Image (tube, grey):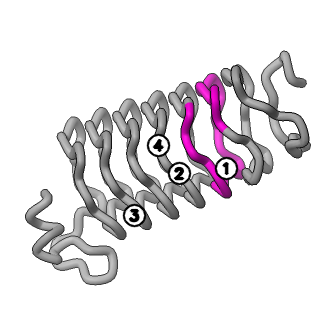
Amino acid sequence: MQFLYESDLIHKDKCVINLAGADLSNADLNNIDWPGVNLCETNLHQASIHDARLNNADLRKSNLSHANLRNTSLVNADLWSANLQNADLSHANLREAKLAAADMSGSNLSNANLYHANLDETDMGKADLSGIDPNNLNLYFTNLSGAILSDTDTNGVNLSNVFLPDDLA
């Protein structure tokens, strides 16, 4: 896989081999450096992608359920309508990521960087959001019911039109 990227065969703007829609379930992509890669509608179920760099990647409608994305950089990545159920995104850098309409229920986002991430209409029910900074997040119609928010300061955060856990509602 790294060879394909380094050979300029799978870059987002110049794609000779298109991985969009590919089945990469259970793949070992740890430490991969694929800025701008097109993985739209790709099956990455249970893939191991920790400590990787996927900045500006196109992951729209991809299946990343149960994937290990711990400590991965996804700055400005497009994850619109992606399935991230039960994914490990702890310590991930999701700065300015587009996560609108994604299913992140049950995911571990503890200590993740979500600065200016778009979480509009995202399902984060039962997700672990402990230690995140919720300021500067777009949370319009986001589901946070059952989410773990320990060590998360929600004072001053606009939570109108957000479905909240019972202890914050």
N-terminal of the two: label 3 or label 2?
3
Mark 4 lies on residue: 92
| Coordinates of residue 64 in the picture (x, y in percent) | 39, 41
Local crowd size for mark 4, using a 10 Å CA cut-off: few (<14), some (14–19), many (≥20): many
Tell me the element at label 1.
loop
Q: Badges 4 and 2: C-beta atoms under 8 Å apart?
A: yes
> What is the secondary structure assignment of the residue under circle 3?
loop
For residue 41, above or below residue 121: below
The CA distance from mark 4 to mark 2 is 6 Å
Please name which of the two marks, 3 or 4, marks the residue nearer to the observer: 4
- Tell me if label 3 and label 2 are in contact, CB under 8 Å: no
The residue furthest top is: 167
Which residue was labeled with disc 2?
94
The residue type indicated by label 3 comes to Ala
Disc 2 packing (10 Å; few <14; some 14–19; many ≥20): many
Q: Nearer the viewer, residue 84 or 36?
A: 36
Specify which label sits upstream in the sequence, 4 or 1: 4
Circle 2 or circle 1, nearest the eye? 2
Mark 3–mark 1 Cα distance, whole angstroms, equals 17 Å
Instruction: Give the vertical position of 127 relative to 78 (above or below).
Output: above
Element assignment for label 2: loop
Residue type pointed to by label 1? Leu
What residue range appears in magenta?
111-132
Would you name the residue on which mark 3 appears?
Answer: 57
The image quarter in which residue 51 lies: top left
Residue 119 numbered mark, or none: 1
In three-dimensional space, the C-alpha distance between marks 2 and 1, rounded to whole angstroms, equals 11 Å
